Image (spheres, rainbow, N blue to C red):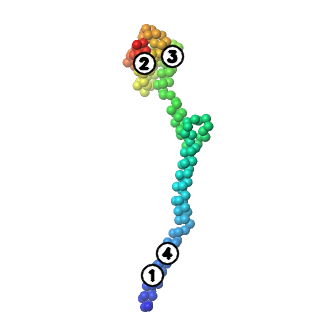
Amino acid sequence: MSLRDATLTRVKHSVKHSATRQTRRGRGPARRIGRSLAFVLPVVLVLSGTLAVTRVDWSGDPSDSVLAASDASAVGASTRATARAPHEVLRDRLLTELKEDDPGTALTHLQQAVNDRPSLARHCASIARSLGRAAVRVYGPARAQSYARPVCDTAFATGVLAAHG
């Protein structure tokens, strides 16, 4: 073996061993922890999701439910859903006023409410028809018709005719 061949063999041998040392250096504790997390993390996520689903009371019976963090948003949504719309509150208030006072006062207050809150205008006709039907039940058709006026395009009169006819 010549000197040149011996030198080449040493260079190849040192390159081979230096590459092996770098590869082994990459297999330290951080790499082992990363591989462990890559295996364990999906298992933990699946199990925690399964447990979260089993904690939700799917029956709808709130008497024995345990409020979990995932249920908190559902409770907020259900209280907003049970809150009544402004036009429903106005209609009920005006129906009570119609029974206690008279349909004319209720119609005046309906017109004022629509003027104050223009968003109620699209519900004005249905509220006026409800008032007309209630006026027939309380006052009879002839007297209820005497209170008719052009609030919400004669919807009150339409309600009176619908209840009467």
> Could you tell me residue 54's position as x and y percent?
56, 45
Whether residue 98 is visible here, answered yes or no, is: yes
For disc 2, the marked residue is 129
Mark toward the start of the polypeptide (3 vs 4): 4
- Residue at image position (48%, 26%) is 86
For disc 4, the marked residue is 20
Between the residue at mark 3 and the residue at mark 1, the CA separation in whole angstroms equals 102 Å
Mark toward the start of the polypeptide (1 vs 4): 1
Residue 35 in the image: above or below residue 9: above
| Nearest the eye: 1 or 127 | 1
In front: label 3 or label 4: 4
Mark toward the start of the polypeptide (1 vs 2): 1
> Could you tell me residue 33's position as x and y percent?
55, 63
For disc 1, the marked residue is 12
Between the residue at mark 1 and the residue at mark 4, the CA separation in whole angstroms equals 12 Å
The three-letter code of the residue at mark 3 reads: Glu
For disc 3, the marked residue is 97
Q: Which mark is residue 76?
A: none
- Residue at image position (52%, 17%) is 96
> Could you tell me residue 163's position as x and y percent?
43, 15
| Nearest the eye: 91 or 105 | 91
Which residue of the protein is positioned furthest toward the front in this rendering?
59
The three-letter code of the residue at mark 1 reads: Lys
Contact between labelled residues 1 and 3, with CB atoms less than 8 Å apart: no
In front: label 3 or label 1: 1
Between the residue at mark 4 and the residue at mark 2, the CA separation in whole angstroms equals 89 Å
Left or right placement of residue 118 versus residue 48 in this view: left
